[in-house]
Amino acid sequence: MTKVTRDAIIKDVKESNVRFLRLMFTDILGTVKNVEVPVSQLDKVLDGKMMFDGSSIEGFVRIQESDMYLKPDFDTWLVFTWETESTKKSRVARLICDIVNPDGTPFLGDPRTNLKRVLKEAKDLGYSSFNLGPEPEFFLLKLDENDEITERPNDNGGYFDLAPTDLAENCRRDIVLELEDLGFEIEASHHEVAPGQHEIDWKYADAVEACDNIQTFKLVVKTVARKYGLHATFMAKPVFGINGSGMHSNMSLFKNNENVFYDESDERQLSTEAYQFLAGLLHHAPAFTAVTNPTVNSYKRLVPGYEAPVYIAWSGSNRTPMIRIPASRGMSTRLEVRSVDPMANPYLALAAMLKAGLDGITNEMTPPEETNDNIYDMDEAQLEQQGIKSLPTSLHSALKALKKNDVIKESLGNHIYTNFVKAKMVEWDSYKAAVSQWEKDNYLHLY
């Protein structure tokens, strides 16, 4: 990431006619929050003196501890390029902020700060960087005459379809152009398997920047979609009977600009550390699934039959296990965790997976044998024979696994862990008490 100075920001404000500053951060549930101030407050913003009420944010602090400060990361400076009638004469810029306490210390309940803490643990072990290349999928749904969201996909396209079958081609192209204007290096853009489903991939980055990019990406996608009269959703399973949306996460670990997952002498050209990191991911998968798949709806995607991985296993070319090793080697050697969905808080998800992998390295874990068969075709006896277990099948079972796993709990820190589990148990209890349309359809007339 290019280092941005205070002077460069001040200069850009004048040259780009920036009139408003959007100070963005992410709450524990992964929702992007922001405080918008006029450019007259620029010096105060750059000094990290902007205060906000932390008690109003999910999982932050109690009301008697509400005063918190926004510390901007200068390297996240962006002037938004899209224009509306209100922005033609004045631009809006953003800075992503870390949250700090009144005494200037980092707030441990800030997901971005928490990821930096886990990255520091990796650096203490000798690793210079941890990279992420995300592949978030999303749906474009139609709006009705009252601009209300419907469940109707915008098209009936399929994998890699083109216009006119893919009616969102122009919308997706505009999303790509906006992202490129904001500095994203787009690698691919295409229609996904399900009707109305899309994917845009961009170049990997160091962990914190990559998570910042995911949050920016979501904002851009939703903003551009609205200009086309569509609603973009990153919900894991918005429509029954078709594939859900994942966020495959390609991860690599570096030491002094060398990819430590690569070893040309190994038959798969994977290093001992790669196998150990892989083993750690598999070992801790039941627990970190509560973080990487954090909603009731997440588990409607993690079911057999819709290409989502539901089994704790790994392979090279086989796409049915939870973890795949893409064919690229050298600097591009990476592990692809396919179970993650785009509802996850990226900062927490990456902290949990990094901690799991590092635990595998520290304890010199060995992964099970590679699974090259189609797991979806295996029966219970075959799965048991090969020692293949399933991911949690509900948010409740994932939370139970999380509560028993000290490594993943530590990846979140006590403050985030406590508040995350509390919020998710409220979500589960609410869901558990609700009466669904499925129950009405199947029981109301019969009984």
Image (tube, grey):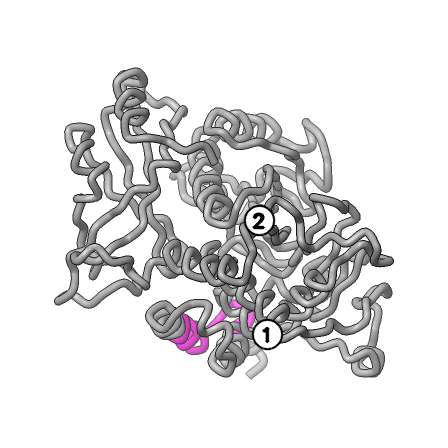
Looking at the rendered structure, the secondary structure element under dot 2 is: strand
**Residue 430 visible, this angle:** no
Looking at the picture, does residue 249 appear above or below residue 147? below
Residue 67 position, x and y percent, is 15, 57
State the mark number for residue 131: 2
| Number of the label disc, if any, that sits on residue 411 | none
Magenta highlight range: 424-440
Quadrant position of the C terminus in the picture:
bottom right
Quarter residue 445 falls in: bottom right
Q: Residue at x 79, y 61 (%)?
A: 315
* x and y, in percent, of residue 194 in the image: 67, 47
User: Is 255 above or below relative to 300?
Assistant: above
Residue 84 versus residue 388: which sits nearer the camera? 388
Residue that appears at 48% across and 41% down: 213
* Residue on which disc 1 sits: 286
Would you call the spot at circle 1 few (<14 residues within 10 Å), some (14-19), or many (20 or more)? many
- Residue 345 picture location, percent across and down: 45, 57
Question: Looking at the picture, how far across and down is residue 414, in whole percent?
Answer: 36, 73
| Kind of residue sitting beneath label 2 | Asn
Which of labels 2 and 1 is toward the front? Answer: 2
**374 on left or right of 146:** right
Residue 369 figure quarter? bottom right
Answer with left or right where residue 20 lies relative to residue 329: left
Amino acid at circle 1 = Pro
Residue in the foreground of this view, choosing between 304 and 219: 219
Q: Is residue 438 magenta?
A: yes
Q: Is residue 265 magenta?
A: no
Q: Residue at x 56, y 63 (%)?
A: 353
